[in-house]
Amino acid sequence: MNGAVVQIRTAEAADEAAWRRLWDGFLAYYDVTLDPAVTAATWARIADPGHLMTCRMAFEGDLALGFAIHHPHCSTWVAGDDVYLEDLFVAPDARGRGVGRALIEDLIAIGRARAWHRLYWNTARDNAQARRLYDSFCTEDGHIRYRMTL
């Protein structure tokens, strides 16, 4: 990480502005505009210690570099819980420095400590940079996602 120490921790209420800056970059990367109420609801879930959705954030000093939003859930395929990494984002100026890898490794460590059975995520087929990182952890499992708006 270019000699700098990156610290990863669970997002706290005081991190809202930093998270929103990263979240805006995440939405811009995917060219998505969300209703501000959705962003507010997402942050409210993250900030609620009783909610299953959690956000781990990577920092270099006071500067937020990225996040990993995830939530565990029960599974019909294993006796324990799986964890879904819903959103992973690293600020453009921090990419290529191991921040994404550190965030995934952090979730792996948490998952092992909490006896989660599997960690899984989705990415766009054409997201070559992310896929190189993900392929270094495991191979894609051949599933195709279907999503219907209700």
Image: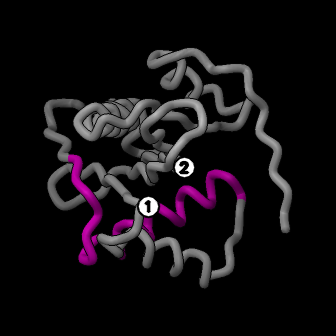
Please provide percent x and percent y for residue 59.
24, 52
Q: Which tag is nearer the camera, tag 2 or tag 1?
A: 1
Q: Is residue 33 above or below residue 22?
A: below
Marking on residue 127: none
| Residue 17 within the segment the image draws in magenta | yes
Disc 2 is placed on an element classified as strand
- Residues in magenta? 8-31
Q: Amino acid at mark 2?
A: Glu
Please provide percent x and percent y for residue 7.
18, 46
Disc 1 is placed on an element classified as loop
- The N terminus is located in which quarter? top left
For residue 137, side relative to residue 128 (left or right): left
Residue located at (39% from left, 66% from top): 19
| Residue 57 within the segment the image draws in magenta | no
For residue 97, side relative to residue 119 (left or right): left
- The image quadrant of residue 53 is bottom left
Question: Relative to the observer, which residue lies in front, 2 or 76?
Answer: 76
For residue 56, side relative to residue 139 (left or right): left
Please provide percent x and percent y for residue 56.
32, 53
Residue 41 can be seen, yes or no: yes
Q: Which residue is mark 1?
A: 53
Question: Relative to the observer, which residue lies in front, 76 or 15?
Answer: 76
Marking on residue 86: 2
